[in-house]
């Protein structure tokens, strides 16, 4: 259920509606808009009697939300969500670039990459301190030491940090080091983890699961939003199919329906989606044309000697060339590369 307040509803009237919803043992979610405030309601198993709320001063109308994901639904929040960090924004009209190595390997490499990205106008750097790997013998990341490196590099360069949280034990440390907390594909339905980041003060980048449907993906986003964190960014990173020509099948066809059903911004990860650096530029351009609000691209100063995912990481010169192509394509699309 969505309560739409009148344009001139006072703060006191809005608070009265919130109190009335709480008295019904339900959870209100104020959603301030450009012209009026709406209030989403979650926690109801059955139907909500609209007469209890529609008679309150300041209430314009009540709208029944039919989707199982309430807060993530465009039915409840018609305007596109803009997610803000101290460095930049992710949302409509822009295509925000998030780039960097798969993992933190050492401080010199992270410093060099951050300086390169800042020189090229990139505001957010991705790098994993904790790495979920299929093999227990593969490099698992530097852990807390890696987070310390990211924090120091952010302080020196000003670049924002996007890094993955794998378990609740490290949530406080990751939240402190990150500007955006990434939930990886294997953890999309780790509900304990989703409930933890719902309490975080930082935006959440939610990667689509290896075989997740769009509804399952949006329901995972709903877990985060239901807990009070409305700053969720969806990330398409490829799904597992029968195809063997690339690491995964990058499902760009999910962008239009995701934008139809949800107000949340969506970024695309062509690096994991293809697994091959030669394919990343073409799929990045296709993602921009398809309506993506951002790109998550792996970049490494020496990808042939990277400790993880070097085969899908761009070199610095290749990344600069891709940025030039993206900026050219953005002009006729009415978009801005940030």
Image (cartoon, rainbow, N blue to C red):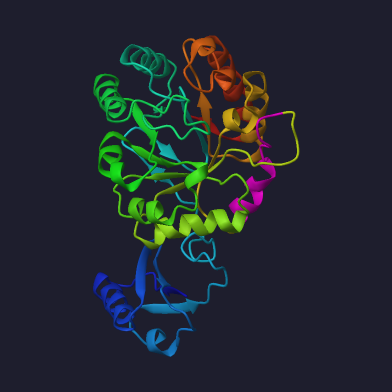
Q: From the top left corner, tell me how far across and down residue 81 is, in percent.
A: 46, 51
- In the displayed structure, 294 sits above or below 5; it is above
- In the displayed structure, 155 sits above or below 243; it is above
Quick check: is 200 in the magenta stretch?
A: no
Q: Residue at x 54, y 18 (%)?
A: 310
Q: From the top left corner, tell me how far across and down residue 200 is, in percent.
A: 30, 49
Q: Is residue 243 left or right of residue 190?
A: right
Q: Nearer the viewer, residue 226 or 184?
A: 184
Q: From the top left corner, tell me how far across and down residue 215 is, in percent.
A: 59, 58
Q: From the top left corner, tell me how far across and down residue 205 is, in percent.
A: 44, 43
Q: Quadrant of residue 182?
A: top left
Q: Nearer the viewer, residue 10 or 62?
A: 62
Q: Residue at x 38, y 55 (%)?
A: 192
Q: Outermost residue toward the front?
A: 137
Q: Is residue 159 left or right of residue 252?
A: left
Q: Which residues are magenta?
A: 246-260
Marks counted in the figure total 0
Magenta span main SS: helix
Quick check: is 256 in the magenta stretch?
A: yes
- In the displayed structure, 163 sits above or below 115; it is below
Q: Quadrant of residue 17?
A: bottom left
- In the displayed structure, 242 sits above or below 303; it is below
Whether residue 34 appears in this view of the structure is no
Q: Nearer the viewer, residue 14 or 117?
A: 117
């Amino acid at each position: 259920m969505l309560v739409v307040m009148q344009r001139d509803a006072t703060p006191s009237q809005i608070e009265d509606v919130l109190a009335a919803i709480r008295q019904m043992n339900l959870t209100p979610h104020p959603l301030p808009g450009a012209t009026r405030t709406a209030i989403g309601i979650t926690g109801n198993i059955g139907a909500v009697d609209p007469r209890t709320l529609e008679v309150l001063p300041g209430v314009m109308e009540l709208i029944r939300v039919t989707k199982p994901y309430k807060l993530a639904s465009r039915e409840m929040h018609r305007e596109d969500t803009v997610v803000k960090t101290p460095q930049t924004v992710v949302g409509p009209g822009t295509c925000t670039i998030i780039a960097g190595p798969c993992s933190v390997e050492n401080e010199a490499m992270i410093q060099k990459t951050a300086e390169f990205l800042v020189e090229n106008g990139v505001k957010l750097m991705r790098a994993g301190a904790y790495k979920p790997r299929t093999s227990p013998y593969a490099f698992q990341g530097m852990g807390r030491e890696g987070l310390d490196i990211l924090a120091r590099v952010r302080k020196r360069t000003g670049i924002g940090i996007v890094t993955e949280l794998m378990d609740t034990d490290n949530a406080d440390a990751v939240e402190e080091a990150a500007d955006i907390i990434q939930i990886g594909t294997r953890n999309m339905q780790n509900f304990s983890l989703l409930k933890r980041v719902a309490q975080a003060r930082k935006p959440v980048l939610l990667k689509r699961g290896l075989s997740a449907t769009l509804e399952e993906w949006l329901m995972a986003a709903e877990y985060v939003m239901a807990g009070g964190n409305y700053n969720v960014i969806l990330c398409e990173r490829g799904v597992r199919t029968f195809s063997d020509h690339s690491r995964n099948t990058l499902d760009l066809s999910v962008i239009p329906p995701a934008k139809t059903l949800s107000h949340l911004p969506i970024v695309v990860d062509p690096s994991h989606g293809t697994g091959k650096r030669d394919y990343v530029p073409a799929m990045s351009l296709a993602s921009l044309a398809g309506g993506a609000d951002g790109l998550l691209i792996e970049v490494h100063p020496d990808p042939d000697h990277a400790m993880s995912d070097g085969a899908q990481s761009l070199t610095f010169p290749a990344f600069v060339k891709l940025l030039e192509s993206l900026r050219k394509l953005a002009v006729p699309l009415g978009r801005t590369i940030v």
